[in-house]
Image: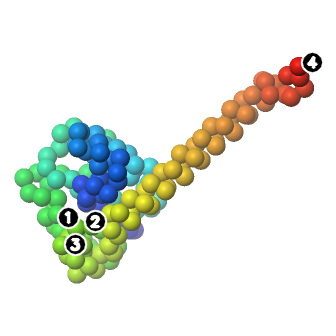
Amino acid sequence: MKHYIIDGNNLIGKIKTLNQIQKNNKQQSREKLAFILGRYFSKRKASVSLHFDGFENDTIKISAIKIIYSGSSNADEKIKDEIERSKNPKNNILITSDSNLAQFGRVCSCHIIKSEEFAKQLLSSSSTTEEQARIDEINSAEEFKKLFGVNAPDKFVTK
């Protein structure tokens, strides 16, 4: 199974809306990223660890994603530790644009995806999911109308 190791702060910096939120509310930007990732990975067979610098403020409740805070060290060191402890580094996919961290990942046989590339995947997947949800909502509304005869065209003819 593929394991995604995500440099959270780096990824937030590559998503314009999250980057703007982070300037005023770091916790909210982290929560939004976690929820976006939760949606993205919900239909994929992969494990995910999301790394943030610093200490946990409020618990972010999201299933299928392990959130790791660096505490008094930095997230890069925690990410490197995770890669080194990995039983099969070739299954790791490291999401970062940090060149030092990416180089470490390459040396350890990880697949590297730059944060800006992954951000594009996330955003295109998110908009597709939202579009599908709206289509489903419209279709179910139409079904509801049909059930109750609301949209029968001959009933609404005005003379």
- Left or right of 109, for residue 42: right
Query: Do the residues under discs 2 and 4 have CB atoms within 8 angstroms?
Result: no
First along the sequence among labels 3 and 4: 3
- Give the quadrant of the N terminus: bottom left
Q: Image quadrant of residue 123?
A: bottom left
Tell me the tag on residue 94: none
Label 2: how many Cα within 10 Å (few below 14, some 14–19, many 20+): many
Marks 3 and 4, how far apart at CA? 71 Å
On the image, the x and y values in percent for residue 3 come to 34, 65
Q: Can residue 42 be seen here?
A: no
58 vs 27, nearest the viewer: 27
Element type where label 2 sits in the image: loop
Q: Residue furthest top?
A: 159
First along the sequence among labels 2 and 1: 1
Mark 3, mark 1: which one is toward the viewer? 3
Q: Which residue is mark 4?
A: 159
Tell me the tag on residue 99: 3
Q: Residue at 13% of width from left, 50% of height from top?
A: 54
Q: Residue at 38% of width from left, 63% of height from top?
A: 118
First along the sequence among labels 4 and 1: 1
Tell me the tag on residue 79: 1
Element type where label 1 sits in the image: helix
Element type where label 3 sits in the image: helix
Mark 2, mark 4: which one is toward the viewer? 4
Tell me the tag on residue 96: 2
Query: Do the residues under discs 2 and 1 have CB atoms within 8 angstroms?
Result: yes
